[in-house]
Amino acid sequence: MRVAYLGPEGTFTHQAVRTWAGRLGVDALHSLPLTTVGDVHDAVSSGTAEVGVVAIESSVEGHVMPSLDVLLASADVVAVDEVVLDVSFDAFVRPGHGALREATAHPHGLAQCRRFVARHGLVEVPAASNGAACRDVGVHQVAFGPRLCGELYGLETFAEAVEDHPGARTRFAVLDRRARAGGRFASGRGHDDGTWRTMVAITPVVTGPGVLARITDAFGARGVNMSSLVTRPLKAREGQYVFVVTLDAAPWEPEVRDLFGDLLAAGDALKVLGAYPAAPGEGGLDGRLADHAPAGSVRADDPAAVVEEGLLW
């Protein structure tokens, strides 16, 4: 099986490819490392690769916008599966390195290792991928990447697990042609625990006050849970946006079909960007307020002065 992914070798996406292939028992795996997420899409669209793998969301940095935008723009490629990896960064250096002045990684990688960067007084240098940073690391640089980079590129491990937030995870989407998705889903409808995720793009035809409230109300009325909502600009129209919603159900489930019918009847344009069984342990939220709200958040039982300061009243 030919699988395209954001290269070079040694990226977390490369690790996701291996994990996905191992889960499916793929023996003859031919990995195609490519330069950009757009290249991965094009390889799938053209048939050069049977599937592609791209990062879609980080628990630390949120959605990976180039991957999301590629799916929004694509006429014939959708997400059909997901891989969720625990992400930990090691810091690598060249053997015989000189004075270390810079840290290099993909921007999401740099964002997850800022305490290490500050502690060592390094300057951040973004790279196209973590694998590329490790492959091309200079004698005055530290590169952040997955553990397999040390072996792949003959590097020394300067420090292990240098990420700011241990336990971070990244979700990867497996891409296939839309015309083949139905066949994949036909077998997937018998998924053991029945837990699916669907990404849908909702473009309101009429914008103005209350548009987002109307859309979220439609989800609530049908009992369909949103696990995330992202706003992306319409590239052709300034000031207009498309809402990308991830929901905890499959698109063919009756309540989701009814929900989509409600949105279509209201004049919205819909596009399913992907549907896939939730990864093990990723079956959705339990409905309780997260314990780790952003710093400075206030709650109803806080003192009045704290609430006024937090809400800028």
Image (spheres, grey):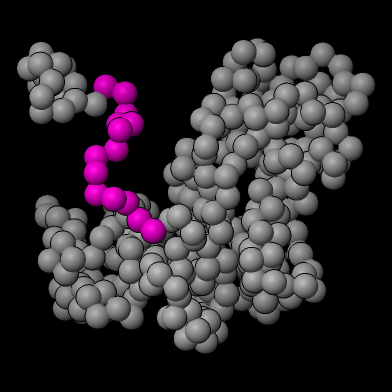
Dominant SS in magenta: loop
Q: Residue at x 32, y 62 (%)?
A: 247
Bounds of the magenta segment: 283-296
Quick one: 194 or 178, which is closer to the camera? Answer: 194
Using the image, determine if residue 294 lies above or below residue 19. above
Q: Residue at x 77, y 38 (%)?
A: 134
Q: Residue at x 44, y 81 (%)?
A: 190
Quadrant assignment, res 40: bottom right
Q: Residue at x 38, y 72 (%)?
A: 194
Does residue 237 show up?
Answer: no
Does residue 190 show up?
Answer: yes
Residue 98 at x, y = what percent?
86, 16
Q: Which quadrant of the figure contains the C terminus?
A: top left
Q: Which quadrant of the figure contains the N terminus?
A: bottom right
Q: Is residue 165 left or right of residue 249?
A: right
Residue 23 at x, y = what percent?
64, 66
Q: Is residue 163 magenta?
A: no
Tag count in the figure?
Answer: 0
Q: Is residue 142 left or right of residue 298?
A: right
Residue 10 at x, y = what percent?
75, 47
Q: Is residue 195 left or right of residue 28?
A: left
Using the image, determine if residue 83 lies above or below residue 75. above
In the image, farthest residue toward the right = 96
In the image, farthest residue toward the front = 192
Using the image, determine if residue 9 lies above or below residue 27. above
Using the image, determine if residue 176 lies above or below residue 86. below
Q: Is residue 295 magenta?
A: yes
Residue 9 at x, y = what percent?
78, 51
Quadrant assignment, res 89: top right
